Structures are given as C-alpha cells and as structure tokens.
Amino acid sequence: MQNTGTNTLLIVDDEKRVVDVLLRTFRDVYDVHGFLSAPEALAAMPDLHAHVILTDEKMPDINGLSFLSKARDIQPGTVNIMLTAYSDQNLAINAINSGLVYRYLIKPWDTDELCLTVRQAFEYHMLLETNRRLTGELTIKNTELEKNLSLLQHTQSRLVQSERLTVVGQLTASIGHELRNPLSRIKTAASLLKSEFGREGGEVQDLLNIVENEVVVSDKIINDLLDFSKDRKSNSAPVHINEIITSSLERTRLSANVSVQTELGKDLPMVLADSGQLQQILVNLILNGSQAMVNGGILKIWSHASGSHISVHISDTGTGIKPSDIPRVFEPLYTTRAKGIGLGMSVVKMLVERNNGTIQIESQLDMGTTVTLTFPISQ
C-alpha cells in the first residue's frame, strides 16, 4: 500500500520513451508511478493514493478526458495535467471547462514550465485538501452550534414559561378561592328562583338558564385556575382505561346535537396512572370537542393497545384549529375562544405528563380535530 504522506504523481502515456523521460524528471522529487495505458493505470489506482495525474490526451485505448473521468470515480481529489502533441485550442478549452483538467500543456514541453506546473498542481492539491478539511470541520461546528442554539432557545423558552407559570400560579390560587364562594351563592339563588318562578316559563326561565350556564362556565374557569396552581403528585395505580372513558362520558353534559360514538378495544391491559387525573383529562377533552361543534356533530372516542402503551383518540367534526395555532395550544393563557382563559389544555398536558403519557393534536380547519393520548401499560 502506498504511503499517503508523500506526494504521489501518476504518469500515463502510450509512448514508453515519454514515460521514461517523465519518470527521470520527477523521481527525485515525488513518488512517481508510470503507466503505458489508461486501463493499467485505472487498475492500479485503488492501491495508490494519487495527488496529481499527468496524462496524454491521445491514447489508443481511451482518450485522456475519458480516462480522467473514470479516475475521478476512483479518486475524486486528484489534480490533473494533460499533455498533447496537438495545438488544438478547442480541445484545451473543453478539457479545462470539464473540471477534470487543471492545466493543459503542448508536446514537446518546456521542462522548466512542466516542473513548475507539476509543483503548482501539488500546491493546489494541498490547498484543496485543506479547504475540504476546513469545510468539514466548519460543517461539524455549524451543526454543533445549531444544536446548542436550539437547546438554548428551548431552555430560554422553558425558563420564561416557568417564570410565567410561577406568577400565574400565585395569582390563580387566591383569585380562584375568592370567586368560588360568590359563584356558589349565585348558583344557589338561581336554583331557588327557578323553583319559585320556573313554572311560569318564558323569559324568566330563559334568563335563569343563562345564569346557571354562565355559572357552570365560570366554575370551569376557576377549577382550571386551581388545578393549574396546584403541584399535585400522581397516585399511580393499575386502572382500566375504558372504564375511565365511560365514567368521563357519564359525567359530561353534552349538547343534544352532539352524537357520541365509541369504539373501545376489548380486553385491553390496564394502564399505570392516576384514575382521578385521567378522568379530568378526558372530561376536559370531551368538553373541548363538544364546544368545537357549535352546530352539532360527531364526537368519536376509540382506544386500542399499541406496543407497550394504550392509545386513546378523541375526535370531533368541529371547526378545527388553524395550523399556526396548533403549536400554541398548550401554552398557558392562550385561547382563541370568547370564553375561557386558556388554561384547560395546559392543565391537560401537565396531567398527561405527570402520568408518563403523551398527547398529540392533529387538526384540519373546518374539518375537525383529533387528540391522541398514550399511557404506559401496567407491568
């Protein structure tokens, strides 16, 4: 195997006299290898680390450009010099424009010019190798920099969100408790008024229904606030996910124009999770799906085993989510709805992650949304 630390020159010419002269000219300066045919040189190249190739253009078996094209497939980094006995300007231009040839010299050559050209070819090869090495190192550094920048941005984003959550948590806990008592009294008063005047129907009944509905909405906001401010740990235990889905549907009051379809997998393994938090997750997602279908639609829930996890899908045929809004769905205080303060999905994500689960959202505008939950199977 050739020593790759030396400057290696390949000489290819079908005239033995030419090859012998060139070998004598360069053997004291470079590691020189002479060949009388292109096929012979191509066969030897895999075992040689050539830096510069000096070849004749006109050869009986294959011309110089074709030889250099094949040589590039074997060793793409060589710097090539072409010799010819013909002063054909178009041939020289085509050779150089092809990118295969560094310099083009006419036979008979001037020895000093040839030696200078070969020396410059080796210098150019060294420059190309250095450039390739530096480019490779720069690419690696750029990749590392991009990773570090991405990590920094992610860390900064989480830090900002953490600070934001701390402030929100402190405010929500106090506000939630302060609002719950007045709302409870309003709900009780509305219920008593319905008992007193409900038989009359008409406008009074409608107004009282509005009061009760708004109290329910406000109570949901307060629950989100309080859930968000709590740092509750999960009491994980083996649970049947289908039972949680069924009980969540029973607890949730949906609009009459919303049809529910379920396809729950049979004999599913139990998942390891907090049953109360699972129910809270599902109730939130069921309500979200229902509220997205203002004019009615289909709410579908299906479950199945997937490897070491159980997957639950909740889909609706509602308004869908804009592609630009999907990355922000789980951000605290972000909402596109007229009612609510944007904590529901933040709470859902927080509870899912506390139970070692994942949550993904797929949505098409005016087509609907599908939320996919996964939880680990209990071992």
Image (cartoon, helix red, strand yellow):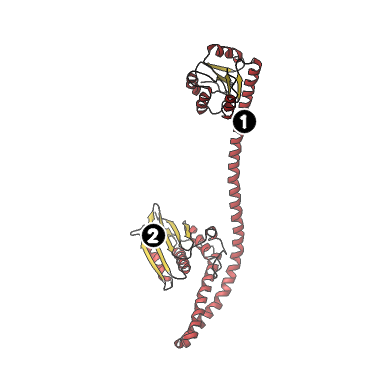
Q: In this view, does 178 lie above or below 190?
A: above
* Residue behind mark 2: 303
Instruction: Give me the residue at 41% from left, 59% from top.
Output: 312
Horizontal placement of 320 versus 244: left or right? right
Instruction: Give me the residue at 59% from left, 24% from top.
Output: 92
Amino acid type at mark 2 = Ser
Helix, strand or loop under label 2 = strand
Quadrant the C terminus occupies: bottom left
Query: Mark 2 or 1 closer to N-term?
Result: 1
Q: Do the residues labelled 2 and 1 touch (CB within 8 Å)?
A: no
- The picture quadrant where one finds residue 145 is top right
Q: Where does residue 324 sit, x and y in percent of width and height?
A: 54, 58
Amino acid type at mark 1 = Thr
Nearest to the observer: residue 300 or residue 212:
300
Instruction: Report the disc number at residue 130.
Output: 1
Q: Which is more foreground, mark 2 or mark 1?
A: 1
